[in-house]
Amino acid sequence: MINGDCSIKAAILLVIIAVTQRQTQVGKRMRKNILSPSILSADFCHLGEDIQKAVEGGAEYIHIDVMDGIFVPQISFGMCVQKSIRKCTDKVFDTHLMITEPIRYVEEFASIGSDIITVHLEACEDVAATLKKIREAGCKAGLSIKPATPVEELRPYLELVDMILIMSVEPGFGGQSYIETSTAKIAETRAMIDESGLDIDLEVDGGINKDNVAMVLEAGANVIVAGSAVFRDDIKQNAGDFAIKLTANDQREKM
C-alpha cells in the first residue's frame, strides 16, 4: 500500500513537472518582442511628428515617462502632454509613472489614453492596492523596480501585474549608460515569471541601444524601451533597425 501511494505521488509529480514545462514553453513561444520608444528623448517642438516617424519605423508602444521631482530628481511632463499626443497615434500608450503615491493619478491617466500604467514598487505605500486600481481603471498594470531593488521583492505581486519593468539605469535621467549587472537581473526576473506560469511581459528601460539590445532580449526581455537611441538623427531608420533586431530574436525563439 505504501509503495502504491509512493507511485501515485511520483506520477502526480511528473504530471506537475510536465505541465509546468509546457506552460513555460507556450509562454516562450507566444511572447512577442515590442519596441517602446521613450518620448523623453524626443524633440518637443515636433513631438507628434517624431512619434509618427517612430511608428513608421516599427514602434508598437509609445513610452511616456512621467516624473514628479520627488520620487526622482527631475520633472518631466504630465497629463496635458499625454492627452495632446493621444490624437497623434493609436499605438499603445505605455505610461511609466515615476511619481510618489501614483495611486492618486491612476484614473486620470486611464481617462486620457493610457493602455499600460507602470508604477514603482518603491513609490507605493500599498503596492497591491495601486495595481488593483490600475486594472479596475481598464488598463494593464506594470510594476517597476530600481537597479538596487532585489528581484525577489516582485514575487508577491506577480498575479496582479501584466508587465514587469526592470530599470537598467537609475530612473529620472535620459541618456545614461546601461548598468551591466542588469543582464543577470533580467534573466532572474524572466525565470521567476516562467516559473509562475503567468502571462507577464518583461520590459527593460535604460541605456539600451542597437549594440546591446540583442543581449537584453536573450536575457529574457520582450518589451524594449529606447530613448536617445531612437529619437536622434533618422528616427524612422533607428526604429526600423531596432524592429529588425527584435523580429530576428522573435524568429529564433520560435524555432
Image (cartoon, grey):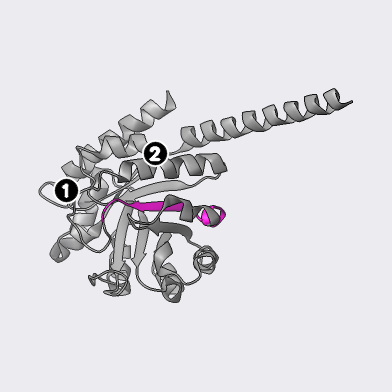
For this rendering, which residue is in front, 183 or 66?
183
For this rendering, which residue is in front, 220 or 47?
220
Residue in the image at 25% along x and 48% along y: 179
Residue in the image at 18% along x and 58% along y: 41
Relative image position of residue 171 (x, y in whole percent)? 28, 61
User: Is 242 on the left or on the right of 9, as rendered?
Assistant: left
**In the structure shown, which secondary structural element does the residue marked by tag 2 occupy?**
loop
The residue range painted magenta reads: 157-169
In terms of sequence position, does the residue under pointer 1 or pointer 2 come before the other?
A: 2
- The disc at residue 193 is none
Residue in the image at 31% along x and 30% along y: 248
Residue 158, magenta (yes or no): yes
Relative image position of residue 198 (x, y in whole percent)? 55, 45
- The disc at residue 235 is 1
Q: Is residue 114 visible?
A: no
Q: What residue type is disc 2 on?
A: Gly
- The disc at residue 220 is 2
7 in relation to 163, above or below: above
